[in-house]
């Protein structure tokens, strides 16, 4: 697997195949590099604020915790390189919200506009629905039109606007709240969890090797 360098990315034409699979510990360096790029981009001087850095061992533990809770942590593998990753976590901790998740998706800057999100996000949605969850929430920068279009194409609706909740690029930024129903959504009463996250989804076995 790619060691995580943002610069060392094969050209798009050299990696036509995209495979969606569960992440593994071997993917951690590549995921860390993608995360660092997106989180640090445009923040600039943060004054006395000290950012909590995500460490490799923390990411490994986070993955294991998600699997125990039947939550997916997926990567898009493109020609042996981790081109993107996505995961879902509980929307809120209180029991009333146990059927609702919030998600994140990060694409390597060298693999943008290759259709990766349109494979990875639906796979995440299906995996969460298979786990018995009913709603998925996301927060997107209001000026990130590409991400907004991706989410709308995958069934998300814009359900709210949070003005000036982030400060980056030297200015205040708005966030758009999006929501997608999973499975039968709110059309019926929830039952017990139907299947573990390792169940076969969309013809693939998500079991980690």
Image (spheres, grey):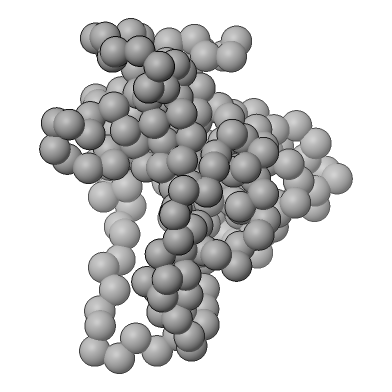
Q: What residue is drawn where x is 45% and y is 61%?
A: 161
Snapshot quadrant of residue 76:
top right
Which quarter of the rendered picture does the N terminus lie within?
Answer: top right
Q: Left of 205 or right of it: where is 52?
A: left
Q: What residue is drawn where x is 49% and y is 10%?
A: 200
Q: Can residue 26 be seen in this snapshot?
A: no
> In this view of the protein, which residue sits in the foreground, 202 or 22?
202
Q: Left of 165 or right of it: where is 8?
A: right
Whether 17 is drawn above or below 130: the answer is: below
Q: Left of 103 or right of it: where is 99?
A: left
Whether 131 is drawn above or below 137: the answer is: above
Residue 91: x %, y % from top left: 29, 41
Q: What residue is drawn where x is 29% and y is 27%?
A: 99
Which quarter of the rendered picture does the C terminus lie within?
Answer: top left
Snapshot quadrant of residue 24:
top left
Q: Left of 193 or right of it: where is 78?
A: right
> How many numbered marks, from 0 up?
0
Residue 90: x %, y % from top left: 27, 38
Residue 118: x %, y % from top left: 67, 37
> In this view of the protein, which residue sits in the foreground, 132 or 186?
186
Q: What residue is drawn where x is 61% and y is 52%?
A: 148
Q: Can residue 52 be seen in this snapshot?
A: yes
């Amino acid at each position: 697997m790619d060691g995580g360098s943002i610069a060392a990315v094969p050209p798009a034409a050299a990696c036509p195949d995209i495979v969606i699979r569960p992440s593994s510990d071997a993917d951690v360096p590549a995921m860390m590099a993608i995360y660092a790029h997106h989180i640090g981009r445009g923040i600039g001087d943060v004054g006395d604020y000290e950012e909590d850095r995500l460490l490799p061992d923390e990411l490994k533990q986070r993955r294991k915790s998600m699997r125990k809770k039947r939550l997916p942590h997926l990567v898009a593998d493109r020609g042996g390189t981790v081109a993107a990753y996505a995961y879902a976590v509980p929307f809120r901790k209180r029991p009333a919200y146990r059927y609702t998740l919030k998600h994140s998706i990060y694409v390597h800057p060298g693999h943008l506009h290759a259709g990766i999100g349109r494979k990875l996000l639906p796979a995440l949605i299906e995996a969460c629905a298979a786990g018995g969850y009913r709603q998925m929430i996301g927060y997107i920068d209001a000026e990130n039109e590409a991400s907004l279009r991706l989410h709308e194409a995958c069934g998300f609706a814009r359900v709210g606007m949070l003005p000036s909740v982030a400060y980056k690029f030297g200015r205040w930024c708005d966030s758009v709240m999006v929501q997608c129903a999973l499975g039968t959504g709110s059309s019926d009463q929830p039952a017990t969890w139907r299947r573990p996250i390792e169940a076969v989804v969309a013809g693939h076995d998500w079991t980690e090797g």
